[in-house]
Amino acid sequence: MADADDVRLLALSLPHVVEIPSSGFDFRVGGHGFVWSYPERRPGQPRRIRTDVAVLFVGDAEERQALLLGEPDLFFTAPGYENAALVMLRLPEVDLERLTELVTDAWRMRAPEGLLDDPA
């Protein structure tokens, strides 16, 4: 079971990461977001920042679809994200090892090539 503090510790342990001030969490590398808290939108209500759900950059539509279909207990999508290479991750459902893998992969995909010490 993971939470926003775990996301913060993992993201800030990666090179050249900047945390953007927000009411949740929002991490960027090279000016590109790779993991942030989910801004839930419901009709007729103000946006609500969900720190129990992380939005993760996943690279492309194929990876997005594989995660959504392969692990529906962990991942979902929402209106407005249909064409984005992003998934929402239910933090209480993921263990720390998997969260580490996901956050690190998102960072690698967004980090400019010059920042990557180990491109593997």
Image: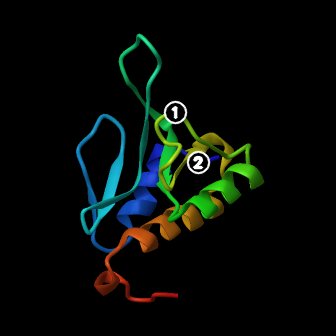
Residue 6 on image: x %, y %: 49, 52
Residue 18 on image: x %, y %: 26, 60
Secondary structure under tag 1 reads: loop
Residue occupying the point 27% across, 72% down: 16
Question: Residue 15 occupies which quadrant of the picture?
Answer: bottom left
Callout 1: few (<14), some (14-19), or many (20+) C-alpha neighbours within 10 Å?
few
Residue 113 on image: x %, y %: 34, 83
Secondary structure under tag 2 reads: loop
Instruction: Write down the residue under mark 1.
Output: 79
| Residue 35: image tag | none
Question: Residue 11 occupies which quadrant of the picture?
Answer: bottom left
Q: Residue placed farthest to the right in the image?
A: 70
Residue 108 on image: x %, y %: 44, 74
Q: Residue placed farthest to the top in the image?
A: 44
81 left or right of 22? right
Callout 2: few (<14), some (14-19), or many (20+) C-alpha neighbours within 10 Å?
some
Instruction: Write down the residue under mark 2.
Output: 2
Residue occupying the point 66% across, 55% down: 65
* N-terminal label among 2 and 1: 2
Is 45 situated above or below 55? Answer: above
Q: Nearer the viewer, mark 2 or mark 1?
A: 1
Is 29 situated above or below 55? Answer: below
Is 34 situated above or below 116? Answer: above
Q: What kind of residue is marked 1?
A: Pro
Q: What kind of residue is marked 2?
A: Ala
